[in-house]
């Protein structure tokens, strides 16, 4: 992830906002809203993807697709937290890793099939990373809100 926000013109911002409303919206429909041809929208979207500004994915309810256990893990570390975060980012069951200030150095979200899978990830993949001093696992009981349509600035 980039440290600085991308420099986006108003049209690119409008395109992003259109895709946040409906990621399957056609390029021609977006073009009508933003005043560009379908081909121009396609090129801009590809550039947004190639530069890492956006990605277009199907967001699922993990429980509905076979992942009944989710958790946020607070991780306390010693040493270079960026190296530890990079190792965590390579773990398949971890879908979100952020460096934080406060009680934890890193937060990592885990999506697992069940409690046994969660335990394996914690014991074999997180706690064995050199520099991990301790973890606190907060198991999700129910997903109440998950959205990605915050727009652009």
Image (cartoon, rainbow, N blue to C red):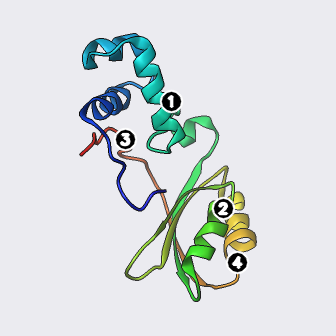
Q: CA distance from mark 2 to mark 4?
A: 16 Å
**Which tag, 2 or 1, sits closer to the chain's start?**
1
**Which tag, 4 or 3, sits closer to the chain's start?**
4
Q: Are marks 4 and 1 in contact (CB under 8 Å)?
A: no
The vertical placement of 4 against 52, above or below, is below
Q: Position of residue 75 (x, y in %)?
A: 53, 77
Closer to the camera, 134 or 89?
A: 89
Which of the two discs, 2 and 1, sits closer to the camera?
1
What residue is disc 3 on? 148
Q: Secondary structure at mark 3?
A: loop
What residue is disc 4 on? 129
What residue is disc 2 on? 118
Q: Secondary structure at mark 4?
A: loop
The residue carrying pointer 4 sits among few (fewer than 14), some (14 to 19) or many (20 or more) residues within 10 Å by Cα, namely some
Residue under the point 32% across and 41% down: 8
Left or right: residue 151 versus residue 26 is left
Q: CA distance from mark 3 to mark 2?
A: 26 Å
Q: Position of residue 20 (x, y in %)?
A: 36, 32
Which of the two discs, 3 and 1, sits closer to the camera?
1
What residue is disc 1 on? 46
Q: CA distance from mark 3 to mark 1?
A: 19 Å
The vertical placement of 52 against 60, above or below, is below
Quarter of image, res 135: bottom right
């Amino acid at each position: 992830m980039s440290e600085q926000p991308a420099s986006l013109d108003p049209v690119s911002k409008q395109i992003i906002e259109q895709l946040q409303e409906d990621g399957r919206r056609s390029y021609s429909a977006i073009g009508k809203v933003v005043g560009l041809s379908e081909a121009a929208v396609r090129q801009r979207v590809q550039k947004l993807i190639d530069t890492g500004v956006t990605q277009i994915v199907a967001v699922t309810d993990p429980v509905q697709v076979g992942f009944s256990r989710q958790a946020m893990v607070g991780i306390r570390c010693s040493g270079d937290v960026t190296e530890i975060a990079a190792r965590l980012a390579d773990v398949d069951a971890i879908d979100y890793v952020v460096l934080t200030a406060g009680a934890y150095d890193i937060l990592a979200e885990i999506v697992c099939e069940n409690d046994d899978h969660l335990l394996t990830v914690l014991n074999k993949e997180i706690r064995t990373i050199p520099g991990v001093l301790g973890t606190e696992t907060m198991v999700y009981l129910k997903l109440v809100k998950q959205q990605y349509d915050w727009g652009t600035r």
